Amino acid sequence: MLAFLAKRIAIGLVTLVVASAVVFLVLEIVPGDPALLMLGMNAQPEALAALREEMGLNQPVLLRYFGWIAGMALGDFGNSYTYSSPVLELIGERVLVSLPLALISLFLSTAIALPVGIFAASRRGKPADTISMGAAQIGVAIPNFWFALILIYLFAVWLRLVPAGGFPGWDAGLWAGFKALLLPAIALALPQAAILARVTRSAMLEVLGEDYIRTARAKGMPRRIVLWHHALRNALIPVLTILGLQFAFLLAGTIIIENVFYLPGLGRLIFQAITQRDLIVVEGVVMLLVATVIAVNILVDIGYAIVDPRLRTRR
Amino acid sequence: MSLLEIENLSLSIAGHPVLRDIDLRIAPGEVLGVVGESGSGKSMTALTVMQLLPELARAKGRVTFDGVDILAAPEEAMCRLRGDDLGMVFQEPMTALNPVKTIGEQVAEGIRWHTGANRPDAEARARAILDRVGLPEAKFPLSRFPHELSGGQRQRVVIAIACALKPKLLIADEPTTALDVVLQAQILDLLRDLVAENRMGLMLISHDLAVVADMADRVSVMRNGAVMESGPTVGVLSEQKHPYTRQLAEASTHVPARARSQEKAEKQEPQPLLSVSGVTRDYPGRRKGLFAKPEPFRAVDNVSFSLAPGHAVALVGRSGCGKSTLARMILALDRPTAGEIRLNGETLGGRSEYELRHARRNMQVVFQDPYGSFNPRHRVERLVAEPLHLLDRKPTAAQRRECVAEALESVGLNAGDMHKYPHEFSGGQRQRISIARAIITRPKLIVADEPVSALDVSIRAQVLDLFADLNQRLDLTYLFITHDLTVARAITDDVMVMHEGRIVESGPTATVLQNPKSEAARALVAAAPDLERAVATRQRATGD
């Protein structure tokens, strides 16, 4: 198990280095002159020269790349051009919004999808199955920003249970912060839950046709227990795969939802940074997202090994 | 009083009749053999008793087990019976165990469920029954996972699960079909002992008359969902009064008529068609530590032999002895670690795929599973014509169809069948299609890996006839890979016995099988079920 873990982490680090090279290439080399890109065509030559100096663009490419990587490794992501503050500080503030948001919606989508998928599989072809999968079909089809607007209208404007947008900050209290994140979390979670429920159902149905389910039934175990004790754990592998992909999407895909709810999260930060051509911020956030995705992948791999003993020794 | 009584049982699944008027009886301590070909309804009868039928199944009639009316019993009552008084063992041990649970958990689970025992007590009982079925603690602790066990060991775990609570009736549905003969003999011995120990009734379902003759006190012969004949084993199988019983018995001991290739053997061809010299194949073993070099596993160990043209040779051995690895190397699908293989004098080693085309044209393969070896979305024409790309000149569409038609006709199918899909054929017909595919390039050598072990006895007899016929007509050379000695006996001139990667004995088939010298060969011959021998032993025992 330890060797397995070490190998996964090593592969993750290599992936991270490759990704950093791609990010650097796309953002700093391909555009030609990043300073010109950031300041626009009408920039003053003096301003351009100053920015080039500040960004170190006059140094050789390799030196710039390694300087950038070394900086990040030491926690120095550079200074934002538009906010004129350290990028790490900007990210730190926003992660406190985006990470709880992603975790809450991940929790919600799993908590909804697994029971619905298992329930539908256990009643295959019956009305309960048809209805829940029909609902899931609708959930997959609805765009989450539109769903978010409906939620705002219903719960914020009409019922006045939660704020319609904005984030009071965690200083205003845990509950206030949670309330502000609840609607966006639901808006993010439901379409994901719909996909996850369908995956869970089909994985469960496949497992329920296996011989060992029949063996368990021949042991005298009732259907319900066979479902939870024998089928679910075997069906978790595809579910974990989708869950890992969805978490990456949740972190990166908050751009629209954070804009709809006016939340100061990573999604809004990267959106604003791109519109303002603040390359340094864009690079920092992208690298953070890459690292998160890789970390989640490692977690999913560990999850596989926990679920399935055959994957512990292999590879 | 009977333990299990089935009267006038009829079963339909989604409106299709599956069973008609089945009558069966099993007394405590009695072994009932249920024989029949696939689709005869043997398994459905068993699943009716267990009430584990598919959802759309409707049963009529009466099934009484130990005083309980099974067909009327509610699900909770069945849950109390299953795994306690009523156990079942299934055919496929590789998939019958949950891969994510330890064998201890899986055996103890039923014990806890039925007796309400706490975990340590249930585990102690699980330990005891695993010891009983031949899985001692030292090598098989409760914490083992199914994937760490072989097929035979897994089947022992399944038997342990079914017998953990000393059931009154055990239903064993083809419990040994997926195992090699030596393992089969061991599992059958175990079942026999369990019957004697606990006066357990045993319903042994098998397609193999010899196994049933060996094990059962009474036999029921089934066909097309109905019982053809029932009675004491000796009477049914020695007198063979019912025509279908006779047909089954004849098919299972069928020997195709072949003009003995003695004169051919004496003619002594100038050079062997296939020569294998000093072939070894190592696979990387499991790493013991982070820096320890993994010890290789030697699957094939310094094997040498040669095959004369027109000969049929059997390569027999237990599962895992290296037969299939050797076959893959002969077919150039795998490369030997050491040694050389020559076909027609040409060496196969170190060649590119393109250079191997000529050799590939001269050797083709027939696999075990006629269901799994075809792409279900291709028509027969395309499937059979596949090897034609090995020819130097690409045939035109018309030539291609002509070749396919000829190949299909020589295996006893119609030229018109080329427009059909594989699912439109029966298992035996599908094996004919794979033989047609193998002979379309006019090869000299056919390697057949368990070509008839997935087929019913009567179809197996027909396919063996076809092999014999093609051997004569096209002067084909065969290498049959099998663990079934009846196949070797029926169709091959010579036999090679393989054990732990080595060929330990070889010679003319009749000589080796009659008078095996090596220990491995003796074990195979002794374990192989034999209908006549089994009936004779039983006759002596009952004093007839």
Image (cartoon, coloured by chain):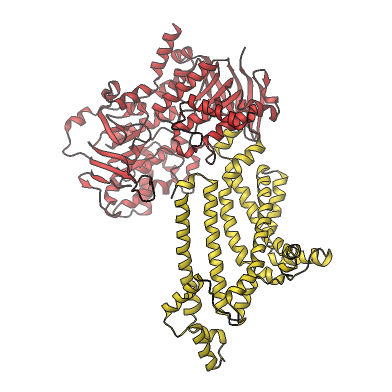
Could you say which chain is coloured yellow in the image?
A
For residue B284, above or below residue A16 = above
**Residue A26 locus on image (x, y percent):** 49, 75
At 30% from the left and 33% from the top, the residue drawn is B498
Left or right relative to A226: residue A167: right
Position of A202 relative to B187 (above/below):
below
Q: Nearer the viewer, residue A141 or B380?
A: A141
Q: Residue at x 46, y 76 (%)?
A: A67
Q: Residue furthest left?
A: B270
Q: Quadrant of residue B270?
A: top left
Instruction: Please report the residue visible at 42 percent of the width from the left and 24 percent of the height from the top.
Output: B185
Chain B display color: red
Residue B62 in the image, given as x and y percentages of width and height: 66, 21
- Whether residue B544 is visible: no
Q: What residue range appears in magenta?
A: B140-144
Q: Is residue A48 visible?
A: yes
Which residue occupies the foreground of this view, B378 or B134?
B134
Q: Residue A109 appears at what percent x and percent y?
A: 67, 56
Question: Going by the image, does B80 lie left or right of B444?
Answer: right
- The front one of B323 and A240 is A240
Q: Quadrant of residue B123?
A: top right
Instruction: Tell me the residue at 53%/65% (across/down).
Output: A291
Residue A186 on image: x %, y %: 71, 60
| Secondary structure mostly taken by the magenta-highlighted segment of the chain | loop
Q: Is residue B491 magenta?
A: no
